[in-house]
Image (cartoon, helix red, strand yellow):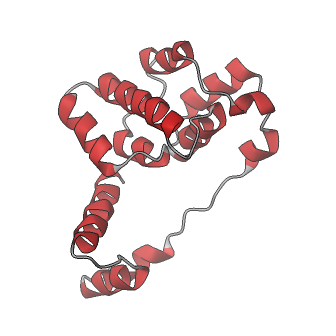
């Protein structure tokens, strides 16, 4: 999954560096050329169960203690690229993290979360507990999601 996501971002960046817009039509043509056109048919269905349970306090920024607990407890797994994408980080930020922490999975996860928390405050999307929960749900980091639900009293 991580390699596919990285490949899609590389493809998009390459197309856009030529002053073109990457479209699904371009992607379909490329997938058809390699006889994999049905990859586009595998749509990820969104789970909205967290939205139904969202509390106003889930709109707060997660504390450093909570983030450290997630990382130290190794509750997220090995989904560095996928997590970075779900948190809304740029592919450049994700690559930089992977380069700076080449054999340190906890360091990579910690650095991604720190970047997300830091850049999000100055960006258009606030780094909230709810957004972190959704990201963990999407990358199937069940242990981390359970920890956040328990910490913030989400049933």
Which residue corresponds to the image point at 31% horizontal and 61% vertical from the top-left?
9
Q: Position of residue 130 (x, y in %)?
A: 66, 36
Near-viewer residue (102 or 90)? 90
Q: Position of residue 64 (x, y in %)?
A: 51, 16
Q: How many marks?
A: 0
Near-viewer residue (5 or 18)? 18
Quarter of the N terminus within the rendering: bottom left
Q: Residue furthest front?
A: 122
Which residue corresponds to the image point at 52% horizontal and 34% vertical from the top-left?
121
Q: Is residue 54 left or right of residue 122?
A: right
Q: Position of residue 136 (x, y in %)?
A: 54, 38
User: Would you identify the image quadrant in which residue 33 lies?
Assistant: bottom left
Q: Is residue 93 left or right of residue 69?
A: left
Which residue corresponds to the image point at 55% horizontal and 28% vertical from the top-left?
144
Near-viewer residue (105 or 94)? 94
Which residue corresponds to the image point at 77% horizontal and 22% vertical from the top-left?
153
- Position above or below: 93 against 69: below
């Amino acid at each position: 999954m991580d390699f596919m996501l990285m490949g899609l971002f590389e493809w998009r960046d390459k197309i856009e560096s030529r002053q073109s817009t990457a479209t699904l039509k371009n992607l379909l043509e490329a997938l058809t050329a390699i006889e994999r056109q049905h990859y586009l048919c595998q749509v990820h269905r969104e789970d909205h169960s967290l939205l139904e349970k969202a509390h106003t306090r889930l709109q707060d920024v997660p504390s450093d203690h909570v983030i450290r607990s997630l990382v130290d407890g190794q509750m997220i797994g090995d989904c560095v690229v996928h997590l970075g994408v779900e948190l809304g980080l740029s592919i450049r930020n994700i690559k930089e993290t992977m380069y700076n922490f080449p054999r340190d999975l906890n360091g990579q996860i910690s650095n991604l979360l720190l970047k997300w928390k830091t850049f999000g405050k100055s960006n258009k999307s606030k780094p909230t507990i709810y957004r972190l929960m959704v990201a963990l749900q999407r990358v199937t980091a069940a242990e981390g999601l359970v920890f956040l639900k328990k910490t913030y009293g989400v049933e």
